[in-house]
Image: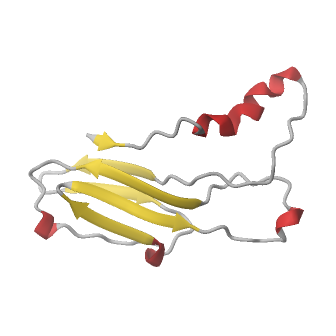
Amino acid sequence: MSLIKWDPFREFNTLPARLAFWGKDWEEPLSTTTYVPSVDIFETDNEVVVKAEMPGMNANDIDVRLENNVLTLKGERHFEKDAKEENYHRIEREYGTFTRSFALPRTVNGDKVSAEYRD
């Protein structure tokens, strides 16, 4: 079973696009939204595997902890300025800090847990 923190305000980020059918060009302020990495969790005969996609992040930006069979991923995806901020017309890539927690099966041995970073 996965525990995912629900953000009730996340849906407001897409509100202008949903209302575009009225024919008005909706202006969005220059801002970034909260980044939440995508995660797959599956079990093999010998292990539970958690794969998280965190593009644009370094291993130094990620903290992985296991406490009471709850795996917690914390980190921050930094905004990469390719141009002066005032030159952007739209920013859709998400940045910021995140925390994700997942309850793992009781059969997981915390002493045998390992983490691997792949670029």
Q: Is residue 112 left or right of residue 24?
A: left
Name above or below for residue 75 compared with residue 8: below
| Colour mapping used in the image | secondary structure
Q: Is residue 115 left or right of residue 33?
A: left
Residue 96 drawn at (x, y percent): 58, 61
Of all residues, the one furthest to the top in this rendering is 22
User: Who's the residue at 59% across and 39% down the image?
Assistant: 10
Of all residues, the one furthest to the bottom in this rendering is 60
Q: Give the number of marks.
A: 0
Q: Is residue 43 left or right of residue 61?
A: left
User: Who's the residue at 36% across and 49% down the image?
Assistant: 40
User: Who's the residue at 12% across and 69% down the image?
Assistant: 111
Residue 81 drawn at (x, y percent): 74, 71
Name above or below for residue 5 compared with residue 25: below
Residue 118 is drawn in which quadrant? bottom left
Residue 116 drawn at (x, y percent): 32, 71
Name above or below for residue 9 compared with residue 93: above
Residue 70 is drawn in which quadrant? bottom left
Residue 110 is drawn in which quadrant? bottom left
User: Who's the residue at 84% across and 60% down the image?
Assistant: 88
The N terminus lies in quadrant: top left
Name above or below for residue 29 compared with residue 15: below
